[in-house]
Image (cartoon, helix red, strand yellow):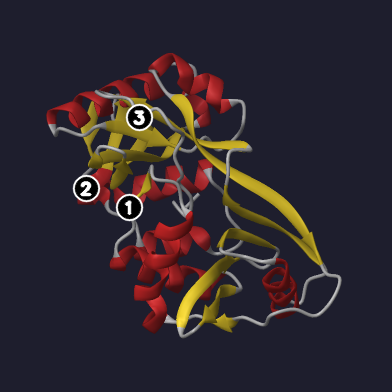
């Protein structure tokens, strides 16, 4: 049976989450304390046993034709004891029906492993959201960044809009504040570089990698490595090198590739 989650389901949801996504870095506790909403969860049960679930997180996607509502399928998982029984297929199909009833333009997701691109393909998902990853190495001094705070949240959107492709996930003020708080709590923080009083570049950093950096220059890269105390690290940003996420369109397909990141991925 497929149904929407209710408040009393949260302990079982958390148990299945821990089974499928074991964590030692504190993310699970933080996610359930600050992001989780049982109202977004679809459950698949078998004789009263929770077998699988997905979260249907609401986002907006900017395209060449405007801004459109989309779903972000997150935390899709099946209990190992109930895999290969069609639970995830039924959950996804149910989510597609809900999306179309609510007038959403597409369903999006980020496969946890490369092989899952092929798993999702029969459901109509195609690789669409792309990133570029590269390694930077400490060689000299550079342009030192400043640690960003909640007060800087309004400035991040301008940098994102400048460097991200036309087709991109829309990020509002609450989004930026939540990401700043999470990277402060669990990561190395968020760093920024200013030019003529305006934020010119930023980097969202974990302890050993940069999940998103926009506007970097060689001098800023060196300054970032110094700030992180690292000799080298991987930096992720906009580009077409690597497929990160998929999309299933319900109506008009955007022709160019898009960008999504910092999606609790």
First in sequence: mark 2 vs mark 1: 2
Q: Position of residue 17 (x, y in %)?
A: 45, 46
Q: Residue at x 51, y 60 (%)?
A: 27
Disc 3 from disc 1: Cα separation: 15 Å
Which residue is disc 2 drawn over?
39
Residue at disc 3, secondary structure: loop
User: Does 168 sit above or below residue 189?
Assistant: above
Whether residue 235 appears in this view of the structure is yes
Q: Please state which of the two labelled residues, at mark 3 or mark 2, is closer to the viewer.
A: 3
Of circles 3 and 1, the one toward us is 3
Residue behind mark 3: 254
Counting residues from the start of the chain, the first of labels 3 and 2 encountered is 2
Read off the residue under disc 1: 170
Q: Is 45 located above or below residue 136 in the figure? A: above
Using the image as rendered, state which of residue 243 and residue 215 is in the foreground: 215
Q: Is residue 21 left or right of residue 241?
A: left
């Amino acid at each position: 049976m497929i149904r929407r989650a209710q408040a009393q389901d949260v302990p079982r949801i958390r148990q299945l989450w821990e089974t499928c996504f074991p964590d030692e870095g504190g993310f699970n506790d933080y996610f359930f304390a600050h992001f989780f909403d049982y109202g977004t969860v679809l459950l698949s049960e078998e004789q009263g046993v929770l077998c699988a679930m997905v979260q249907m997180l609401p986002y907006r996607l900017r395209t060449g034709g405007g801004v459109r509502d989309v779903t972000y399928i997150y935390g899709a998982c099946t209990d190992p004891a109930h895999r290969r029984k069609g639970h995830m297929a039924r959950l996804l199909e149910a989510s597609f029906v809900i999306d179309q009833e609510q007038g959403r333009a597409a369903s999006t997701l980020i496969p946890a492993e490369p092989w899952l691109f092929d798993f999702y393909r029969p459901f109509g998902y195609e690789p669409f959201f792309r990133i570029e990853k590269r390694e930077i190495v400490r060689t000299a001094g550079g342009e030192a960044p400043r640690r960003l705070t909640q007060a800087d949240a309004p400035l991040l959107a301008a940098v994102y809009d400048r460097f991200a492709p036309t087709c991109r996930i829309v990020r509002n003020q609450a989004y930026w504040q939540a990401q700043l708080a999470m990277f402060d709590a669990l990561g190395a923080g968020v760093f920024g570089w200013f030019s003529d009083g305006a934020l010119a570049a930023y980097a969202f950093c974990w302890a050993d990698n940069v999940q998103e950096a926009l506007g970097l220059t060689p001098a800023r890269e060196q300054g970032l490595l110094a700030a992180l105390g690292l000799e080298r690290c991987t930096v992720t940003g906009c580009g077409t090198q690597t497929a990160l996420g998929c999309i299933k369109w319900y109506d008009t397909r955007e022709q160019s590739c898009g960008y999504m990141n910092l999606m609790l991925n």
